[in-house]
Amino acid sequence: DQERVDRFRHSIARALRFLLHLQIALPDLASVGTDEHLGAVRSSLRRRNLRCDNAQHFLTAMLRASALFQNEELQLAKM
């Protein structure tokens, strides 16, 4: 039913927003490292350690979820 589909889509969008918060942005570089760390993915919101498996899981989730959304909806997930 459509209500259930909408709830799943909303949950996925919230999960994507959380994942984007784990990604290293410009303001984070002062506490994490140099420009080469820009876009890297942290283990958690509280830990600054960077691991390649975190990035792999992040990319897999983002790619699979992007197939479910239109570009406009993905922009909403970033907010």
Image (cartoon, rainbow, N blue to C red):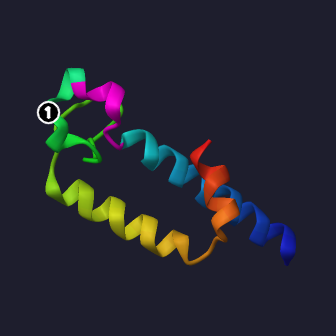
Magenta residue span: 23-29
**Observer able to see residue 46:** no
Q: Work out which quarter of the rendered image holds the C terminus and state it.
A: top right
Residue drawn where x is 36% and y is 32% of the image: 45
Q: Position of residue 37 (x, y in %)?
A: 19, 41
Corner quadrant of residue 50: top left
The answer to whether residue 5 is magenta is no
Question: How many residues crowd around disc 1 within 10 Å: few (fewer than 14), some, or many (20 or more)?
Answer: few
Q: Relative to 27, say whether 61 is above or below.
A: below
Residue drawn where x is 31% and y is 39% of the image: 24
Q: Along the horizontal axis of the image, is 79 left or right of 6?
A: left
Q: Residue furthest top?
A: 30
Q: Along the horizontal axis of the image, is 31 left or right of 25?
A: left
The secondary structure type at the circle numbered 1 is loop
Residue underneath mark 1 = 34
Q: Position of residue 41 (x, y in %)?
A: 28, 47
Q: How many marks?
A: 1
Q: Relative to 21, say whether 32 is above or below.
A: above
The answer to whether residue 27 is magenta is yes
Q: Relative to 45, say whether 36 is above or below.
A: below
